[in-house]
Amino acid sequence: MSAPAPEIDLDGEFERRLISCLMIDVPQIERVRGRVAPSDFFDLRSRAVFEILLDKGPELSDPTHPVVDHALLAKALDERGELELVGGISGLVECSGLEAIPSFSVVYAREIKKSAVAREIRRYSRELDRHPEDAEAFSFLTERFEELRELTCGIDAQSGSLVGLTGPSLDALAAEADPESPLPGFLDPEPSLHILHGVAKTGKTTFAWLLGLAWATGRSPWEGAPRLPGSRVLILSGEQGTRKCLRVLRRITQTAELGSFEDWRDRVTIVGRRAEMSPLDRKILRLDEDGIDIIRRVLKAAEEAGHPFGLIIADSLSRLKPAGASTQDNDDMVGVLDPLAALSIEMGVYFLLIHHDGHNADRQGKAIDGVRGASAIRDVPQVLLVIARVSDNPRQRIMRVAGNELPDLTQVFEVATEWEPEGYINRFALDSDWALDVDSVFENGPLSLMEFGRRALGWAPDRAPSGGAKDKAKALLNDFENRGVIRKDGRKWRLVKD
């Protein structure tokens, strides 16, 4: 009997991740007890640490702060004569040095168990190849294959669930705090696919790259915004050469006052067109199966090295889509966008994809209805952002945002001062005298107006307005005006300054 070769975690990644999460969250020890045994560990150092955590975990931490004390753990290992096996304190740190998510402890344990079973399958397969008549080995091998199948399907021994999460696994997920958006109003609370669209020369790329620079350096993209995470940023440009990308990024750094080139030179990775490109660079600039697989490998390698990426900016859909795929074909776009959405969720990285709109005047500047191309471009992303020109002010841009978990947002930005040449987009600063225009009122409707009042002014109506959408919007605007917080200015309403 010749068996297929199951995948084995020979480098001990999941073993180190499990050790890491048990050391930073001691209660997780009870979640994995019985799911995986010390003998399932391939690395002898990790095996020794895991065994002592099972035996003495709570004793190695403060009850009010359930994190394992390295000194107490080292002492316990030394008492068993195993500290030298682990490699001393430095080896102990190495055993627990991978980033890990405590709520994934059961997942890590399952992967360790899978590798242990796979090793047994390989060993007994070789034995059965030498002695095909060995009925005991055949029976054992059959049982191990069944166990591996169940582990691979994700059976939870405590809940009996064949797929997904239920019971204790759902309890652990429910106990986690709700995520918060790194940029409320603009980005989803959880890493996901976002599409930024607009017609040519409206500042889509500048906005995205400004966001990327602020993200990489842990700064606010504009005054009043929160500081962004500070993790690494990957820029994929099918539109520009690498040299031009660098030149524009350095200019934005200066004009938007985001520090200096030295602040982000090792925090931002740029893949653009250039004369001498590596095969991987060429493949990653094509969002087909090979290109997305390379992105995944890059993200995993960065995470394992302890310097994960948090944001990917891709410019643009039309330039990076697979050869032969059409932005007008729904199946083609699902085939491109769905893997990107899955990648964002699985790898915990925000993916901001830039997309060019057409020049239909009736649709420009509309977050949902303004998207050019197949309906999948509107349906697959969690968030749609659109940038448009402000007709009577070339130094301003209006942005509208629509998302599954975001209230509709309309925001005006100043992109250049009156002393700077028209046509330059140097920054995105919140306009202190921004106006709510008529079109956005009737596109986003009264709920958007009510959210604007709640967030910007701490205001709530005395009672919900009645009538159709336009009547409700007019009633809300009249209420704003009567309270003296906005004033009518032609076809716009402006905030009344204090």
Image (cartoon, rainbow, N blue to C red):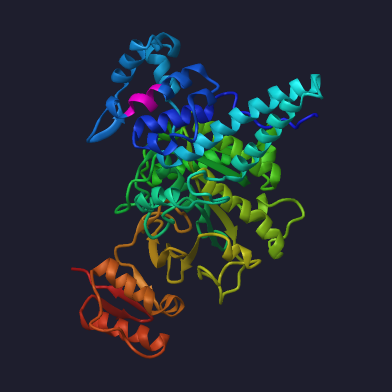
Q: Position of residue 24 (x, y in %)?
A: 35, 32
Span shown in magenta = 52-57
- The residue shown at (38%, 89%) is 471
Task: Decide whether residue 53 is among the magenta residues.
Answer: yes
Question: Which corner quadrant holds the C terminus?
Answer: bottom left
Quarter in which the N terminus is drawn = top right
- Vertical placement of residue 171 versus 329, above or below: above
Q: Is residue 2 visible?
A: yes
Q: Is residue 273 visible to the viewer in this orientation of the structure?
A: no
Q: Residue furthest left?
A: 498
Outermost front residue: 135
From what the image shows, is residue 463 above or below residue 141?
below
* In this rendering, position of residue 380 left or right of residue 102: right
Image x and y of residue 135, in percent: 76, 27
Position above or below: 143 against 207: above
Residue 253 percent across, percent down from the top left: 42, 42
Give percent across and percent down for residue 101. 43, 39
- What residue is drawn where x is 42% and y is 15%? 91
Q: Magenta span has 114?
A: no
Q: In the rendered image of this protein, does residue 205 appear above or below residue 13?
A: below
What residue is drawn where x is 39% and y is 15%? 90
Q: Residue at x 53, y 49 (%)?
A: 160
